[in-house]
Amino acid sequence: MDLKIKNKYKTEFKKALDTFTEKLEKYVSTENGDWSVKGFIDVYKNIYTISSDTKIVSKILEIHIFPQILQFAEENNYNIILTEHQNYYPDLTFIHKENEQVKFAVDLKTTYRKKNGISSFTLGSHGSYFKERDKKKNIQFPYNQYLGHFCLGVIYTRTDINADDPTDTEIYQVQELQEDYETPNTKVGERKVTTVDNLKSITSVIKDFDFFVAEKWKIASDKQGSGNTANIGSTLSIEDLRNENGIFSQLGEEWFDEYWINHGSATMVKDGKPTKITTLRDFLEFKGRKDLWDKIVSRKPYKKDTK
């Protein structure tokens, strides 16, 4: 497949994803911006609220929007393959129904707002499958078979930033769900049950959603995203995520690839000592391309999100 045709498919897929994300905010929200998911319900109509722990919220959000993702794929003539293992990349593989050479990788990423941007998230590994792009280790298909690598991101505000403890879960009974002959529960075990008039009376753990789609390389930073693991970090600016304005965005995908393939292994001499290269600025100097320093996108001073 020549480059022109690849870019045509890529542009069309990105445009379709952009349109799709515009609909998702309304799908997951009440009219005042709260998450429409209030908790879990059992057969006795007890509703258990959700912890705002990021892993719990992330998984439930993925389940919540997955029917919409399936519909998107069908409407745009793609099949979806889910990752076979938990630590495999990507979360979703889209394969065109009429041309199986057309594959796109889509990772679902969720994060919450902080005073100075967002809590960090990662953009996949820069290890085995990223370096050996014709291999299938920890990846659904070899990396070089994908025409594009996208992040479908969800940014939200936590209603109570201290509500990480699952023991803080509250239990409700909702009058609008009760039949006339039913008597509301007052306790579940030793836990008190609170009765409210309707589901909307229950406070959602998150609110104010902002969905975005970006090519992974355009929102990447030059820093690892999580401790000692070989994961690529993202920009922490909400504005830069929306506008695909990461540190590599003016340099191009080739520099993103080369930098992260060599991250932590390439070495240069600084102040007379061998030093592993872990910044884009040093890498460009190492490659003899100081002339490209002005294309490094610096993080802008934080402006309060106006959403």
Image (spheres, helix red, strand yellow):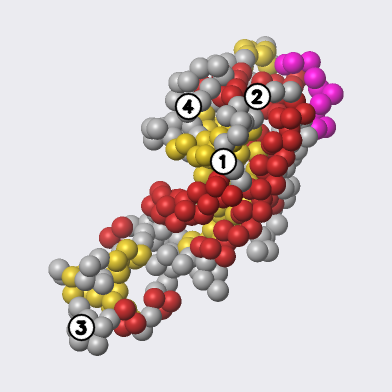
Image quadrant occupied by the C terminus = bottom right
Q: CA distance from mark 1 to mark 2?
A: 27 Å
Q: Position of residue 159 (x, y in %)?
A: 47, 66
Q: Amino acid at mark 3?
A: Glu
Q: Tell me the kind of residue under disc 4.
A: Ile
Name the N-terminal-most of marks 2 and 4.
4
As measured in the structure, the alpha-carbon distance from the residue carrying label 3 to the one carrying label 4 is: 52 Å
- Vertical order, 294 against 303 (above or below): above
Residue type, numbered disc 2:
Asp
At which x and y percent is residue 211? 60, 54
Q: CA distance from mark 2 to mark 4?
A: 17 Å
Type of secondary structure dominating the magenta stretch: helix
Using the image, determine if residue 94 lies above or below residue 141: below
Q: Mark 3 = which residue?
A: 182
Question: Which label number is shown at residue 139?
Answer: 4
* Pair 1/2: label in front: 1
**Left or right: residue 260 compared with residue 12:** left
Q: Which residues are magenta?
A: 286-295
Please name whichever residue, 60 or 192, is drawn nearer the observer in this view of the structure. 60
Q: CA distance from mark 2 to mark 3?
A: 62 Å
Label located before the other in sequence (3 or 1): 1
Instruction: Residue 178: give x, y in percent of width and height.
Output: 27, 81
Mark 3 element type: loop
Residue 257 is labelled as 2
Q: How many marks?
A: 4
- From the viewer's perspective, is residue 243 above or below residue 208? above
The amino acid beneath tag 1 is: Tyr
Q: Quadrant of the N terminus?
A: top right
